[in-house]
Image (cartoon, rainbow, N blue to C red):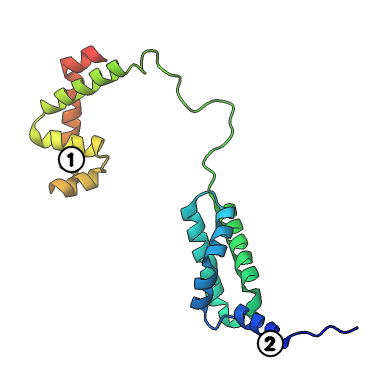
Amino acid sequence: MTTTVCTSASQAATRSLTYPSFSSYVKARQPVLLRTARSLTANPSDAEDLLQTALTKTYVAWERIEDHRALDGYVRRALLNTRTSQWRKRKVDEFACDELPEPEPVSGGDDPAEQQALHDAMWRAISKLPARQRAMVVLRYYEDLSEVQTAEVLGVSVGTVKSAVSRALGKLREDPELLLVR
């Protein structure tokens, strides 16, 4: 017994699976491929980046891909390989050790009232500094700028910043209000 096959239907299916251009493929399949990328990452933004990288690899190989019906498999493989490479290249910042690197908590150091009192006393002491020293201390320690960046912002030399900050810190160490809070 033979089964007749409708050739026009199979040709239509083949035509619908072949994509004349890369952009038409991306438009048609992006939502499905993005779901696959999201299953490989925890962050939706990382999934979009991962898909973009995989599509870039697919675009580069577009002319070499013979069977455009297998494009989804090619892109999924690119997604998986790219994610695996990212995972292998990640930098590990934590290492197991016998001792905890964090210092022991100071008793009473977590009291918000004491922290606010210290904060207020520090700002009062900083406000007593001359304007130029005050600006340098704020830029260096509150804005976390380097000495070079502070010098550029204020239009002075790096040596001026170093000496002025040193004198300002000396005045802050001698401030009686800060001695009481410490």
Q: How many numbered marks appear?
A: 2
Q: Judge from the rendering whether residue 19 lies leftward or rightward of residue 106; answer left or right.
A: right
Mark 1 crowdedness (10 Å alpha carbons): few <14, some 14-19, many ≥20 = many
Pick the front one: 122 or 4: 4
Which residue is farthest right?
Answer: 1
- The answer to which image quadrant residue 139 occupies is top left
Pick the front one: 114 or 78: 78
Residue 123 locus on image (x, y percent)? 17, 26
**Residue 171 shows in this picture:** no
Residue 16 locus on image (x, y percent)? 60, 79
Give the numbered dot on residue 79.
none
At label 2, the amino acid type is: Ser
Contact, CB < 8 Å: mark 2 with mark 1?
A: no
Q: Residue at x 70, y 83 (%)?
A: 10
Q: Judge from the rendering whether residue 11 lies leftward or rightward of residue 42; answer left or right.
A: right
At label 1, the amino acid type is: Val
Residue 73 locus on image (x, y percent)? 65, 69
- The answer to which image quadrant residue 72 occupies is bottom right
Q: Which residue is mark 1?
A: 161
Pick the front one: 74 or 152: 74
Q: Secondary structure at mark 1?
A: helix
Residue 44 locus on image (x, y percent)? 49, 53
Work out whether 44 lies above or below 30.
above
Q: Please state, as top left, top right, bottom left or bottom right, where the C terminus lies in the image.
A: top left
Q: Residue at x 54, y 75 (%)?
A: 25
Q: Residue at x 34, y 16 (%)?
A: 111
Q: Secondary structure at mark 2?
A: helix
Mark 2 crowdedness (10 Å alpha carbons): few <14, some 14-19, many ≥20 = few
Distance of mark 2 from mark 1, alpha carbons?
81 Å
Mark 2 or mark 1: whose residue is earlier in sequence: 2
Q: Which residue is mark 2?
A: 8
